[in-house]
Image (cartoon, rainbow, N blue to C red):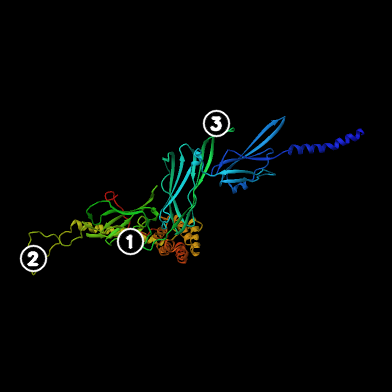
Amino acid sequence: MPIGVRRGLRRAARPFAALLLAWTVTNPARAEITAAVEGEEIRAGQSFVLSFQSDTGGGRPDLSPLQRDFEVLGTARRTNISIENGRAMRTTLWQVKLIPRHAGSVTIPSIEFGAERSQPLTIAIAPATGGPDDAGNRLRLEVTATPQAPYVQQQVLLTVRLFVPQEVDLVESSFGDPRVDGGDALITAAGKVRERQRTERGVRERMIERTYAIFPQTHGELVIEPLTFEGQVFESQATFDNPFGQSIRTRRLQSEPIPLRVRPVPREFKGRHWLPAQSLTLVENWSEENATLKAGEPIARSLTLLAKGLTAGQLPEIAVAMPEVVKSYPEAPVLDDHGRSEGITGLRMEKQTLIINANGAVTLPEIRIPWWNTGTDRPEVAVIAAQTLQVVGGIPAPRETPPTPAAAPAPAPAATTPGPRTPPAPPFWRHLAILLASGWALTSLAWWRSRAHAARHAGGPSDSVPPGSEAARIADQVLAYARNDDAVRTRQALQRWASARTINPATLDGIARRHPDLAPALQELDRCLYAGGPAGWSGAELATAFAISHRSPGVARDRPTTQPTALAPLYLSSETDPR
């Protein structure tokens, strides 16, 4: 072959040789992604690591096919570069941490890594309960609810216990918050997490316990959803990759759902406020015990309502109808919840200063608060008996008759006294009474003018709700739910609206006390929710009353109505302050 022809063929073959070399470098003879699991045994509820190794790197894996049988906790990527026979080799290792959702034979499907795919892998998953030598699998979760057939608004104690063998080193742990399905409920933690040691069947173990109080708000079927525990367990197991034998494995336990059958308010209960409690006491205290009361002087009285199994927000106002001669100056109530493993104990304390403007016997009326004893399943009444107070002293009325000497004889009826008589000077007490009466009249006039000025400015911009505020937005929700006859959502929106308007407590009773014009419609909503069921409720009346109360100009809103408006504020000196 001529030399020129050979040179031409070599020039033409050079581009093809370059393309062949590039294809060989980017596409090795055998490129594959292999899958493998770490550990000798895999158990349900216990984490393990699934590894994917690629010689070409590939793309980011699509792990969505694993979601059906596993929960993906996290992924990690590691790249190794080595040189063999003068040639650089790169290996990419993907590690995926998984928790099996169930036991049995499970096939890990083919996973895509960009343009490449791994081969399927079948593994065996053992049940969650391990053998006697597998301490990490002897973690136990126990969840109980008492009672399982409560009344509406009755306390249900949900107790969560985790049992940990003494040889297990639990690094981290967390419990999921309880949730309910099929109804509405108030859920709060009762006390703190408790931990103690115990011996069960010769095995020393720790018991970690936490208690929740659940208050169902509607009657019917209610399900407590499964609770989840997740913890990191330290294990000692030497392997080739970990010669020191230190590893941390994630353990997850899940309880079974607990159904509740919530009963409505029983027909035998005739009280205005439904109070299902384990115990309820009403206590009275005075600032001065067995003291002699004087007319016109203040004395402090406190009434305390203590209920085991109810929150303070569920306790009603202690209504007392005082006689006309008794003026009452109430203070803001004290509300407090005390949570322990036995449940919630609610306290409501009402303090008031009384001034009795009469001498003699004054009777304070009896106080009765009906409640339902959940232990005996019978109605009961907490009572403070009527009591009669003896009031003495006070400023006597001024007398017009001057003092007469004791030895002077009484004049005869028909006798006349010749000459004019000069009346004696009025005594000191008469001048003092006139001075005090004048001061009181001036004070009353100034107070009346301030009240009239406040009434003229009631409902102004400072008392109105800005159109774009949170309270205005929630008020629109209240109207929408009420017009759709949705009793449950209407009550929830009203409670959120009360919180936004700083009404304490943010309950239907609290709103009714702050807005008496809404009280009849709120009582009908409360009755339908807790007795007849929310299905037959009509919200037209509540929507109309709420729209008028919330939106009408010139109406003072969110103002307390418990203190009589005819009474001036009471200012106590340091000498007479009962506290």
Kind of residue sitting beneath label 1: Ala
- The correct choice, above or below, for 100 with respect to 307 in the image is above
Tell me if residue 444 can be seen: yes
Query: Observer-nearest residue: 437 or 347?
Result: 347
Which quadrant is the N terminus positioned in?
top right
Residue at mark 1 to residue at mark 3: CA–CA distance: 83 Å
Q: Which of marks 1 and 2 precedes in the sequence?
A: 2
Give the SS element for disc 1. Answer: loop
Q: Which of marks 3 and 1 precedes in the sequence?
A: 3
Mark 3 and mark 2 in contact (Cβ < 8 Å)? no
- In the rendering, which numbered label is found on residue 566? 1
- The correct choice, above or below, for 484 with respect to 505 in the image is below
Q: Position of residue 555 (x, y in %)?
A: 43, 62
Return the residue at label 2: 411
Kind of residue sitting beneath label 3: Phe
Return the residue at label 3: 244
Query: Left or right: 242 with respect to 574?
Result: right
State which quadrant residue 43 falls in.
top right
Foreground: disc 1 or disc 3: 3
Give the SS element for disc 2. Answer: loop
Q: Position of residue 414 (x, y in %)?
A: 8, 70
Tell me if residue 462 can be seen: no
